[in-house]
Image (cartoon, coloured by chain):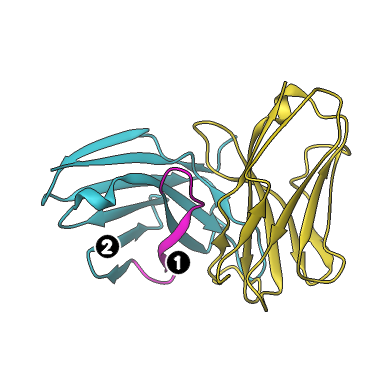
Chain colours: A cyan, B yellow
Amino acid sequence: DQQVKQNSPSLSVQEGRISILNCDYTNSMFDYFLWYKKYPAEGPTFLISISSIKDKNEDGRFTVFLNKSAKHLSLHIVPSQPGDSAVYFCAATGTSYDKVIFGPGTSLSVIP
Amino acid sequence: GAGVSQTPSNKVTEKGKYVELRCDPISGHTALYWYRQSLGQGPEFLIYFQGTGAADDSGLPNDRFFAVRPEGSVSTLKIQRTERGDSAMYLCASSASGTSADTQYFGPGTRLTVL
């Protein structure tokens, strides 16, 4: 049973437009949420995170929104750039030293 | 090297053989994680070390899988009697302290293929 879901396996966006990647989770005990980006032949790299006490966190072109009541988060990238083309993993964890649970990923293609 | 390194990058073995996968974490990082990633899936947690001890090994699929970190730095993931279903990308990550909010830094992975 997947605790972290990313229902869109792929997404294609025009350069300069907004990319919105969605993630849903089922475990209400999750306390901290992360997004990782992965290029081919490389390991995932941390992108941005959000604590459950917040509903928004912004870092440059990247913003993560959290809706705890809906158990939903989204990553917004604006403006999208071709270099953003990668697989994006949503992940979640509980407090303290809990393990991180990853979603299956969404492959983003930004078209020049 | 500044990042997490993993060797070998690729490993091809035959069913029933024993394999060892190595992870060199970032120097000074106390926490080390092993994940397995199958095609089209996200990384799946296997085991987490805090220093030399396995703090959480709940993700190891069965007793054919074992991992060690004897000196609190390098770790080895060991798989006995490999099966075709063990074929996957094995990822290692390290973090400074191991708390949930601590960034995990991933290595490039070892692609294991069991024929």
Q: Residue at x 53, y 31 (%)?
A: B39
Query: What amino acid is found at the position of numbered circle 2 in the picture?
Result: Phe
In the shown orientation, is residue B50 left or right of residue B95? Answer: right
Please tell me which residue is depicted at 60% across the width and 34% down the height of the picture: A1
Circle 2 residue: A62
The residue pinned by badge 1 equals A52
The disc at residue A64 is none
| B105 lies above or below A28 | below
Q: Residues within 10 Å of mark 2 (few under 14, many from 20)?
A: some
Q: Is residue B32 left or right of residue A11?
A: right
Q: Amino acid at mark 1?
A: Ser
Q: Position of residue B104 (x, y in %)?
A: 56, 64
Q: Residues within 10 Å of mark 1 (few under 14, many from 20)?
A: some
In the image, B99 versus B104, the foreground residue is B104
Residue A59 occupies which quadrant of the picture? bottom left
Residue A53 located within the stretch drawn in magenta:
yes
Magenta span: A39-55
Q: Is residue B50 magenta?
A: no
